[in-house]
Image (cartoon, helix red, strand yellow):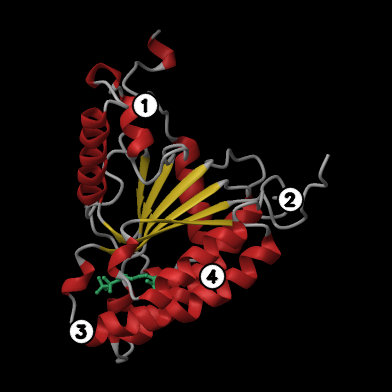
Amino acid sequence: MAEEKKGIGFGENAGSGTDGLTVPAHVAMILDGNGRWAKKRGLPRQMGHKKGCETLEEMIEICAEMGIRYLTVYAFSTENWRRPQDEVGALMQLFRYYAKRLLKRAKKSNVRVKMIGEKRRFSPDLIEAIDLLERETKDNTGMTFIFAVNYGARDEITRAVRHMAEDCKAGTLKPEEITEACVSSYLDTAGIPDPDLLIRTSGELRLSNFLLWQLAYSEFYITDCLWPDFNREELLSAIRQYNKRERRFGGVSAAVK
Ligand code: FPP
């Protein structure tokens, strides 16, 4: 049997602050507040995004160390292209730079990296960087880090429906075979369990077109903390809150059964 790769993979969470807590298997995060973080300091918005990328790098390692098995982050939405051109350009530059760093760090930490969203809109070098990240880390056995870029849930569902219609037309899928599991298997997140916990930073109370199908039964944790300031303590607060929730998935409380 092949020797299990070493790394900060799941199950190595001793001392990570989660003792006595159930660690959610899949955490999804909406990274919000980079602009406000920069504004508060009189800095250009780009500086907020740069600090946000540094926070994300740290968070990937912290989540892996805590034993979280899937971390999905909303890094760039299908709507974010509407931002001023210089801001979009700066985000693409950051993406280029951090994709290279992520490759090195993911290999070292045994993290598998996957992208969700529609990558065709990116420049060829970025598409190549994304492909490389996925290819080079596909056999890693630690945490799976999923980054949503040029992602919108309505776009994802629309692409899935179109794909199913094409398969029906080609005769490889029958309409009566379209179950919830079948729909899930056509989404970008096929094979990935739904998130247990959604964290949104900077206090906004909306989903912003993120994982609309997959978050159906997830627990939500909203914090006023701006993304660049998010840290281990903030994540632990979210996990502690998660541990107080009773997940009923539409059923009734165990206490009234
Ligand atoms: C939201 O803050 C954040 C983003 C639009 C991008 C955040 C992504 C990262 C830091 C991860 C790295 C990803 C890439 C693609 C480089 P905001 O600008 O909406 O903040 P505001 O609401 O305070 O203005």
Q: Give the mark nearest the N terminus, 4 or 2.
A: 2
Closer to the camera in the image, 214 or 156: 156
Secondary structure under the numbered disc 4 in the rendered image: helix
Q: Give the mark nearest the N terminus, 3 or 1.
A: 3
* Above or below, 127 relative to 15: below
Secondary structure under the numbered disc 1 in the rendered image: helix
Q: Give the mark nearest the N terminus, 1 or 2.
A: 2
Residue pictured at 31% horizontal, 58% vertical: 118
Name which quarter of the figure residue 184 lies in: top left
In the picture of the structure, the residue carrying the numbered disc 2 is 14
How far across and how far down the image is residue 91, in percent? 34, 79
How far across and how far down the image is residue 122, in percent? 32, 71
Secondary structure under the numbered disc 3 in the rendered image: helix
**In the picture, which quadrant includes the N terminus?**
top right
In the picture of the structure, the residue carrying the numbered disc 4 is 57
In the picture of the structure, the residue carrying the numbered disc 3 is 85
* Above or below, 77 relative to 206: below
Residue pictured at 66% horizontal, 64% vertical: 107
Asked if labels 2 and 1 touch by Cβ distance under 8 angstroms, the answer is no
How far across and how far down the image is residue 136, in percent? 61, 62
In the picture of the structure, the residue carrying the numbered disc 1 is 181
Q: Of tags 4 and 1, which is closer to the observer?
A: 1
Given the image, on which type of amino acid does mark 3 rest? Answer: Gln
Q: Of tags 4 and 2, which is closer to the observer?
A: 4
